[in-house]
Amino acid sequence: MRVLIIKTSSLGDVIHTLPALTDAARVFPGIRFDWVVEEAFAEIPSWHPAVQRVIPVSVRRWRKHPLKALDSGEWRAFRQAVSTTEYDVVIDAQGLLKSAWLGRYARSPVSGLDWQSAREPLASLFYSHRHAVPWGRHAVLRVRELFAQALGYSLPAEAGGERDGATDAGAGAYGLDHARVLATATHQPDTHAPYLVFLHGTTWATKHWPASYWRQLAERASAHGWQVRLPWGSLTEEERAKRIVAGIPGASVLPRLTLTDLAAELAEASACVAVDTGLGHLAAALDVPTLSLFGPTNPGFTGAWGRRQVHLAADFGCAPCLKKICDHTPTDDERTRFDLVTEQPLCFTRLAPPRVWAELEALLTQHDTHPRTPA
């Protein structure tokens, strides 16, 4: 069976799709997938053994410069790639107008979410087969249900009863081939001493754990003999990472890494601490013990899904607000107790460094991971 998947972005959404491929491969051992994905994330599908071909697109760039896309031949190459193969099934796992637009160039009928289930309901008008997948569940389970309906199989009974979407997420649920990830990485992590990775970068300003908190956590980790490594993806993130680790023994900022190289770094880590970020989902997909910190967002819907994943959500009055800009008005007590410049957003004051360190230590102890002997 040959299936075309359309799931272009974001990083977390792409990773959330992987367990559905694993489900399908267990039911149909010979199944092979082609995957249409944004070029920035094109490395990820290639790590799954059931993916035969990755078809990169750059919808964001094409929208900005449509004539360049035509002149360069990129658009023509995409159309040829999806239209020359007769697929048994085409699945639009994105549920957006942009993904529905891409799917119309496939020669085979497209399956997707129905009007009530799609993020952009109008997208459902472009599908030949529409499937109802209820909201209010973890994103991984919703994609798994869509694939099961589109390909005609039943999910395991335990898939519907997970807590935070994770009880049936065994070590191979994402299906990633660690050997393939490490073999294709040009940067090989230094594994002479156990280390932690702090995934401090994210998109919304409100999802950022305060930099001063990251520094306090790095100081505690260093005092207990751990090496700490911080990746970055922009100059702003690099500058913040340097401020966090400055002068802390054993704490360092990683060089600029490709997604594959960063995956290799994560795969060898003893544990990660993350905010609500796509890289936290990547750590989960690689089965790395990860402590994820949530302020304005809901881990029940988009938390890191898998084994050895711990979510700490702020029990603040207005959380989860799902807002990109914090509009909380501090009380007089909060103005007295907290630094309103560095401790923002205030919902993260419920996840202060001492509590996070205690949870991280418990996670490390649970999985029998030990640091190097302090100097």
Image (cartoon, rainbow, N blue to C red):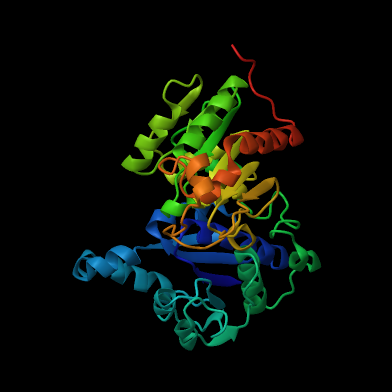
Residue 362 or residue 94, whichever sits in front: 362
Number of numbered discs visible in the structure rendering: 0
Q: Is residue 53 visible?
A: yes
Q: Is residue 39 left or right of residue 343?
A: left
Q: Position of residue 151 (x, y in %)?
A: 65, 76
Identify the residue at image location x=59%, y=44%.
351
Residue 8 lies in what quarter of the image? bottom left
Residue 27 or residue 154, whichever sits in front: 154
Q: Is residue 160 left or right of residue 72?
A: right
Q: Position of residue 240 (x, y in %)?
A: 39, 37
Residue 132 lies in what quarter of the image? bottom right
Instruction: Note whether 54 is above or below 137 in the view shown.
Output: above
Q: Is residue 182 left or right of residue 154?
A: left
Residue 51 lies in what quarter of the image? bottom right
Residue 240 or residue 329, whichever sits in front: 329
Image quadrant for the C terminus?
top right
Instruction: Note whether 219 is above or below 175 in the view shown.
Output: above
Identify the residue at image location x=57%, y=54%.
48
Image quadrant for the N terminus?
bottom right
Q: Position of residue 272 (x, y in %)?
A: 58, 39
Question: Which residue is farthest right?
Answer: 157
Q: Is residue 73 visible?
A: no
Q: Position of residue 181 (x, y in %)?
A: 53, 43
Identify the residue at image location x=60%, y=69%.
143
Instruction: Note whether 161 is above or below 193 in the view shown.
Output: below
Question: Which residue is farthest top?
Answer: 375
